[in-house]
Image: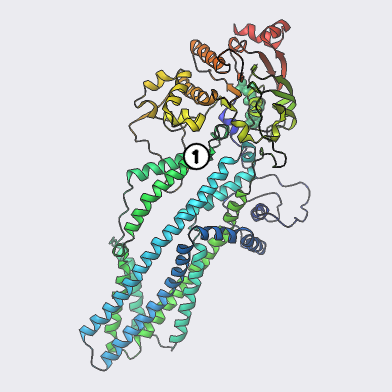
């Protein structure tokens, strides 16, 4: 039977190394090839680093990085730049201007100190003059802080829009990918690295990797050049021991302050409720988009656009409240860095020391701070360049993932549109169909052939593991097949666009998805277009005999249904809120009714030609089962009783199976018997034996 495990993917173990000695690799061509080449273990073709592993810095990878920069990085930067050209240009300019600050700061302090030195030497020192000089220094620092604060706020806006773009693009592509594409271990690695790239926009979480690393490199180089220039202009030899001691002391002062627990950090802003809700909703949508368990239902019910829209709406809500608070927090006063003031005050002992010194203290001080800054900036540049180098490969994973094409998607030149039959229903012709799960040696289906006329009902019965659910998945176009052919309304199913085909189907999987959301959404997801329509949801709930369940819930249709194993993706800021008072759990049978209601949301739509149910009533009592099948039968017929939709159901209850027009008895991946209940009983074969055993 269909189960969530069916859609779990193969373990991501790297493919085994080839037996033959490796032949020289052809030069990688696409961004995907380049990305893959960067992951290859040295001297082991076909074996790969695990996703997220840092690429060794060698000539081959440097070449790949260079090519990738041409192939995708520059284009991506161009797109990101285009999102906010003015702010991005401003951000770059401010980065460069701010990188000149440290050198300018050293120079300005040197000037002040030298002036004081000459005032003292000439005997015209006054405390008022000292006050004026220190005040002018403080003013300069305040202007610097204000610019820093403005630059930080501007940077937040630029990063936020880039982050939105990247995440939206990623979600957009992810929801389109089908089960066969996602089953490929290399594709899964690619998506994982692309995900790391998207997460890097939250900053700091992955070895401090950030997309701003590329910008920082430019500003660090500018900073180093400006310091070197200053050092060069100051070099005159002498270094005073006391100044050195005081410098060491002044450098350790901020450390001592932090040791003593004196903090000037701003308190964490309180997360407003609306923002928290939006974040939670975003997290749910992400979970739906990324979860393998929900993938079949996402595909079948065409939830892609709805997921994207819900995520974007929630994102917008979270960003608007988040941004307003970020602008609030970025007010000039709140951003003034007190440790910078402490640093300015540390110059006073140097000035007092002037009385015992004949050297130019200003130049010594500037020399000292520039040396320190150059050493620090070079270290920083090396670390940042290393991160940017790794970032290039993660970025290429993102670019390559954007080019992935769902495997079930026909080529544009082969694609044909789904054509409905004149009186509804679906003609299904299966010829010699075989399928083996990836990595398995034994086929799950062998040479399956049967025909179903429009409006006919088929029951698939048989022993555990005989291939019933696999056959259903192929008919639903969730997975492909290797051999044979499948025609739907006379058209090869491989020429149909799966998302278009899915609009004509509704289903209940045996292990259907349980969404950690309201009853309305759990049911309404079956037909997103009508999710907002309360009467439509209520009608579906009634058809599934779930109205009793819903009325007993604390908040009716708005009750959030708890699901075990709702695993959030650990995005910074993402969390799930289980504190709502209107939460409730459901029993297995109650959940089954909700899943049936979901299928019934769209079952009645005229476009829907095929209803597929995999053990839809396994947890229901005999009375409820009969009622549900009566409803299914009613839906599949016109008001005058003419069959207008095909129904395929998998069941172990043969008393239910006998209601079908045709029965397929499956054993070991083959259809061993096919025909009506009466014909199969007359045959006195496996079906008859199974039927006798069940009554
Ligand atoms: N994802 C998978 N990967 C590998 N093998 C699988 C996978 N899913 C099913 N199989 C194998 O394919 C065969 C058919 O499985 P399928 O689920 O179609 O059987 P079924 O008739 O629906 O069984 P049941 O009545 O127990 O639900 C089984 O041998 C099973 O082990």
Q: Is residue 250 above or below residue 663?
A: below
Pick the residue in front: 546 or 691.
546
Image quarter where ligand 1 lies: top right
Residue at image point 54% right, 26% down: 511
Asked if residue 469 lies left or right of residue 377, the reply is right
**Picture quarter containing residue 334?**
bottom left
- Find residue 429 and report its horizontal and vertical position in percent: 72, 24
Name the foreground residue: 204 vs 58. 204
Residue 442 showing in the rendered view: no
Of residues 523 and 68, which is closer to you in this image? 523
Count the marks.
Answer: 1
Residue 286 in the image: state x and y as whole percent.
49, 42
Tell me residue 461's x, y (percent).
64, 16
The one nearer the camera, 123 or 422, is: 422
For disc 1, the marked residue is 307
| Above or below, comparing residue 69 to residue 562 in the picture | below
Spot occupied by residue 626 in the image (x, y as percentages of width and height): 52, 11
Residue 119, above or below 592:
below
């Amino acid at each position: 039977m269909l189960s969530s495990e069916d859609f779990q993917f193969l373990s991501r173990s790297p493919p085994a190394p080839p037996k033959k000695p490796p032949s020289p690799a052809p030069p990688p061509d696409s961004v995907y090839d380049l990305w893959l080449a960067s992951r290859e273990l040295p001297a082991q073709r076909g074996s790969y680093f695990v996703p997220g592993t840092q690429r060794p810095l060698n000539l081959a990878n440097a070449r790949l990085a260079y090519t990738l920069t041409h192939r995708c990085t520059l284009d991506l930067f161009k797109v990101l730049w285009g999102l906010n050209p003015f702010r991005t240009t401003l951000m770059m300019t401010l980065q460069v201007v701010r990188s000149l600050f440290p050198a300018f700061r050293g120079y300005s302090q040197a000037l002040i100190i030298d002036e004081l030195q000459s005032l003292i030497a000439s005997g015209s020192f006054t405390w008022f003059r000292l006050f004026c000089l220190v005040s002018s220094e403080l003013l300069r620092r305040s202007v610097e802080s204000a610019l820093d604060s403005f630059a930080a706020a501007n940077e937040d806006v630029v990063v936020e829009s880039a982050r939105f773009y990247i995440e939206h693009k990623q979600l957009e592509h992810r929801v389109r990918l089908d089960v066969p594409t996602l089953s490929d271990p290399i594709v899964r690695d690619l998506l994982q690295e692309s995900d790391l790239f998207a997460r890097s926009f939250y900053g700091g979480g992955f070895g401090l990797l950030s997309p701003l690393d590329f910008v920082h490199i430019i500003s660090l180089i500018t900073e180093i050049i400006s310091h070197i220039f200053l050092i060069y202009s100051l070099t005159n030899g002498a270094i005073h021991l006391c100044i050195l001691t005081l410098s060491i002391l002044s450098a350790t002062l901020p450390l001592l302050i932090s040791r003593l627990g004196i903090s000037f950090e701003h308190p964490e802003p309180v997360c407003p409720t609306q923002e928290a809700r939006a974040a939670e909703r975003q997290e749910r949508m992400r979970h739906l988009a990324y979860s393998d368990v929900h993938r079949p239902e996402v595909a079948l019910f065409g939830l892609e656009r709805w997921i994207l829209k819900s995520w974007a709406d929630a994102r917008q809500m979270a960003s608007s409240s988040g941004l307003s608070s970020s602008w609030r927090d970025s007010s000039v006063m709140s951003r003034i860095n007190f440790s910078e003031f402490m640093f300015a005050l540390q110059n006073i002992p140097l000035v007092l020391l002037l009385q015992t010194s004949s050297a130019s203290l200003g130049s010594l001080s500037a020399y000292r701070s520039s040396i320190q800054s150059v050493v620090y900036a070079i270290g920083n540049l090396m670390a940042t360049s290393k991160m940017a180098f790794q970032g290039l490969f993660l970025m290429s994973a993102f670019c390559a993932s954007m080019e992935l094409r769902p495997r079930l998607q026909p080529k544009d030149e082969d694609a044909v549109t789904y054509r409905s039959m004149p009186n509804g229903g679906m003609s299904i012709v299966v010829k010699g169909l075989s399928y083996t799960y990836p990595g398995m040696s034994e086929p799950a289906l062998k040479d399956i052939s049967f025909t179903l006329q429009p409006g006919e009902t088929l029951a698939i019965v048989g022993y555990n593991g005989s291939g019933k659910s696999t056959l259903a998945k192929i008919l639903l176009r969730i997975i492909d097949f290797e051999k044979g052919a499948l025609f739907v309304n006379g058209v090869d199913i491989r020429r149909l666009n799966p998302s278009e085909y899915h609009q004509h189907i509704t289903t209940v999987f045996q292990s259907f998805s349980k969404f950690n959301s309201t009853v309305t959404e759990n049911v309404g997801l079956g037909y997103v277009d009508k999710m907002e329509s309360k009467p439509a949801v209520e009608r579906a709930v009634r058809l599934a005999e779930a109205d009793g369940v819903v009325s007993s819930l604390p908040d009716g249709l708005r009750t959030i249904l708890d699901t075990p194993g709702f695993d959030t993706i650990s995005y910074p800021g993402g969390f799930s809120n289980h504190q709502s008072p209107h939460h409730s759990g459901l029993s297995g049978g109650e959940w089954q009714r909700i899943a049936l209601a979901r299928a019934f949301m769209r079952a009645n739509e005229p476009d829907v030609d095929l209803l597929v149910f995999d053990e839809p009533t396994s947890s229901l009592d005999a009375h409820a089962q009969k009622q549900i099948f009566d409803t299914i039968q009613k839906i599949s017929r016109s008001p005058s009783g003419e069959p207008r939709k095909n129904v395929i159901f998998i069941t172990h209850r043969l008393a239910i199976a006998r209601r079908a027009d045709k029965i397929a008895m499956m054993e070991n991946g083959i259809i061993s018997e096919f025909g009506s209940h009466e014909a199969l009983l007359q045959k006195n074969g496996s079906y008859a034996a199974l039927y006798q055993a069940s009554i």
